[in-house]
Image (spheres, helix red, strand yellow):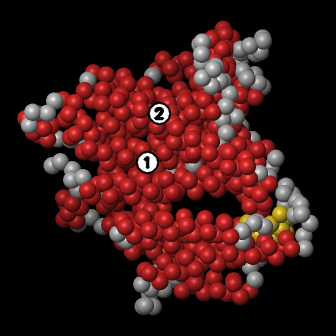
């Protein structure tokens, strides 16, 4: 994992010195490395887009998840469950395309699509984490005389944290992949490199764009898994 | 009925009333430029507002169901009617596209309907009937031609043959890759169930495959298949080529492997050792145990994998449109290129519809199987 990370950093710092790696995949003397826009800058704007979307959808999904599991929001719980399971069948690409008429071209529709699509895994897992707790824990919290707010902050949320982190992981990995498609609606992401490769039949471009996104996705996947393990060890 | 406010109903009313204020349709001089908004006629606005406000009170759930259906029907039929009226005297190039008001009203009444169905907790049989009923109603409304003057249907009329062709290609991509994934994934899942040492490596390879962005995986398949077609004797004659449907099919197949293999493993591991011992004790061979005991007991989990794969592939097949693999994605990306949103809708709406129907139908199937197969204790 560390090796992959170092390789990625070296590649982004100086893509030109890796052209020998990609040269065999070009034809007719086409360039081996995408230079239209620096790769590190595309990576950065790709990651910013994903980070903003994931942070926003996590925040909103957490608040909604807590609201519908409170006594005053219980009326929404069955509906919320149905919406999450039905909503996740919506194809991300379709959501992205449908956001264009509302937002115009650019980063806007991509952000909205990533945000909307990212809500569901976090929300679903927050619900699961907050509602599937063993009855003994509920009883113990009540017996200790915790107020509902104390129980939420000191018992329910810490116990649900590993499951919530799993939801965030799903959201982040899906967003990372979907953001590449965002470049079809003119968002600045690594998808630009892949699309340039598709348009000029230059496999080297397709591969380097895919490689950077793939390595980052694996690293995010592993990172969130480590966090979830840490969180579940802390709560025992 | 009691006079206590129903909170979900309040939410739907808020969304719906916002939809009533915003224009129902956009009346555009042609398919690309923006147009002017046109609202609902006053009596219909009053009718819909009445349904929305009534939804804020407590009623028997069956009445909410009726309210949601009536609202949806009114909104859709009004869309068609408005389009017919506006297009009556308009030049042929003009378009009447559904606007923010229409989408919000559609959302509000769909939520009302979904909420009513969820709270009614109908039996499985009723849910099947409802699914069939909704699909039937959609088909009926489309075949009567009432919506024919709406922009999306105008786009459809202009390319009916292409639509049917790409629809067939989309289905072929989604179901073909599912079939391939089952053909390879089931034996692979059984194999790693029998030999635990291979589990880690196989699952991590499949996990890494899933992290490759779909766009890149589709792209990488093109040169690989181009090379195969050029260098493997007989491949080109068998229809394998670097462009077209093959790269997309294989990319989707690769994405589908992980859910199939890991659910096969989960399903097989979920059968208790006691059950297996009992079967072996009855004198069944290992293969008979696998075929007669393990696989039937693992069936619900397998079906869950099929649901994941099918819904995922119907969505991902859109990307095939970008690499010339066909499917409804062709319209989505053509539409994005021409900034013709009606064309985008022509590709996106059937895709969403297919994914929804596939997801709901397979959910119901999983539930009915779960009821019939008692899990081993």
Q: Residue at x 48, y 78 (%)?
A: B65
Q: Which quadrant does the N terminus of chain A fall into?
A: top left
Chain letter for the residue marked with disc 1 in the picture: B
Q: Quadrant of residue B146?
A: bottom right
**Where A103 falls versus B59 (above or below)?**
above
Q: Residue at x 24, y 52 (%)?
A: B373
- Left or right placement of residue A58 versus residue A104 in this view: left
Mark 2–mark 1 Cα distance, whole angstroms, equals 15 Å
- Left or right placement of residue B134 versus residue B304 in this view: right
Q: Residue at x 72, y 21 (%)?
A: A202
Measuring from the top left, give residue B241's x and y in whole percent.
65, 24
Looking at the picture, tell me which residue is in the foreground, B218 or B123. B123
Q: Mark 1 packing: few (<14 Cα in 10 Å), some, or many (20+)? A: many
**Where B194 falls versus B136 (above or below)?**
above
Report the disc number at residue B180: 2
Mark 1: secondary structure? helix
Q: Residue at x 61, y 76 (%)?
A: B73
Measuring from the top left, give residue B143's x and y in whole percent.
66, 66
> Which badge, 2 or 1, comes first in the chain's sequence?
2
**Where A80 falls versus B259 (above or below)?**
below
- Left or right placement of residue A229 versus residue B144 in this view: left
To which residue does mark 1 refer?
B307
Chain letter for the residue marked with disc 2 in the picture: B
Measuring from the top left, give residue B127's x and y in whole percent.
41, 67
Looking at the picture, tell me which residue is in the foreground, B305 or B126. B126
Furthest residue toward left? B281
**Residue B320 visible to an observer of this rendering:** yes
Q: Mark 2–mark 1 contact, CB under 8 Å?
A: no
Have a look at marks 2 and 1 and say if they share a chain: yes
Mark 2: secondary structure? helix
């Amino acid at each position: 994992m560390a090796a992959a990370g170092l390789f990625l950093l070296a590649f982004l710092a100086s893509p030109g010195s890796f052209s020998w790696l990609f040269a065999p995949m070009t034809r007719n003397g086409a360039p081996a490395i995408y230079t239209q826009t620096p790769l590190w800058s595309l990576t950065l704007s790709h990651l910013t887009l994903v980070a903003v979307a994931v942070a926003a959808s996590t925040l909103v999904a957490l608040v909604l998840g807590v609201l519908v599991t409170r006594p005053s929001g219980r009326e929404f719980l069955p509906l919320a469950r149905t919406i999450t399971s039905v909503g996740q069948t919506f194809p991300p690409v379709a959501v992205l395309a449908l956001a264009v008429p509302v937002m115009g071209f650019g980063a806007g529709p991509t952000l909205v699509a990533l945000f909307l699509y990212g809500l569901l895994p976090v929300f679903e897992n927050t619900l699961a984490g907050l509602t599937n707790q063993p009855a003994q824990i509920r009883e113990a919290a009540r017996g200790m005389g915790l107020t509902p707010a104390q129980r939420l902050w000191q018992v329910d949320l810490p116990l649900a944290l590993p499951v919530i982190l799993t939801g965030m992981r799903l959201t982040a990995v899906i967003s990372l992949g979907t953001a590449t498609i965002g470049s079809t609606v003119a968002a600045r992401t690594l998808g630009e490199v892949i699309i340039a490769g598709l348009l000029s039949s230059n496999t080297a471009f397709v591969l380097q764009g895919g490689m950077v996104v793939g390595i980052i996705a694996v690293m995010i996947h592993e990172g969130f898994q480590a966090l979830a393990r840490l969180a579940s060890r802390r709560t025992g | 009925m009691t006079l206590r406010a129903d909170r979900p109903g309040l939410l739907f009313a808020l969304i719906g009333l916002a939809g009533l204020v915003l224009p129902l349709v956009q009346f555009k001089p042609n398919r690309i430029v923006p147009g002017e908004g046109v609202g609902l006629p006053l009596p219909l606005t009053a009718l819909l507002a009445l349904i929305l406000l009534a939804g804020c009170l407590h009623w028997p759930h069956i009445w909410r169901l009726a309210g949601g259906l009536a609202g949806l029907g009114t909104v859709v039929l009004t869309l068609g009617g408005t389009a017919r009226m506006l297009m009556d005297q308009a030049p042929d190039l003009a378009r009447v596209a559904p606007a923010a008001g229409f989408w919000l009203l559609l959302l509000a009444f769909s939520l009302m309907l979904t909420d009513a169905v969820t709270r009614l907790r109908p039996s499985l049989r009723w849910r099947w009937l409802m699914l069939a009923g909704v699909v039937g109603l959609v088909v009926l409304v489309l075949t009567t031609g009432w919506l024919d003057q709406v922009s999306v249907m105008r786009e459809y009329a202009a390319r009916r043959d292409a639509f049917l062709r790409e629809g067939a290609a989309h289905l072929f991509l989604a179901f073909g890759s599912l079939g391939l994934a089952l053909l390879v994934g089931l034996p692979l899942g059984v194999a790693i169930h029998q030999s635990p040492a291979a589990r880690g490596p196989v699952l991590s390879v499949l996990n890494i495959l899933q992290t490759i962005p779909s766009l890149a995986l589709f792209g990488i398949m093109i040169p690989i298949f181009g090379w195969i077609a050029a260098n493997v004797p007989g491949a080109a004659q068998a229809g394998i080529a670097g462009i077209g449907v093959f790269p997309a099919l294989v990319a989707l197949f690769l994405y589908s492997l992980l859910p199939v293999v890991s659910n096969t493993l989960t399903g097989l591991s979920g059968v208790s050792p006691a059950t297996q011992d009992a079967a072996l004790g009855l004198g069944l061979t290992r293969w008979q145990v696998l075929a007669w005991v393990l696989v039937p007991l693992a069936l619900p989990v397998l079906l869950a994998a099929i649901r994941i794969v099918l819904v995922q592939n119907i969505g991902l097949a859109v990307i095939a449109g970008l690499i010339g693999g066909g499917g409804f994605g062709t319209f989505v990306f053509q539409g994005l290129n021409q900034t013709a949103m009606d064309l985008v809708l022509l590709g996106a709406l059937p895709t969403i519809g297919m994914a929804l129907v596939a997801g709901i139908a397979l959910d119901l199937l999983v539930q009915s199987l779960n009821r019939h197969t008692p899990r081993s204790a």
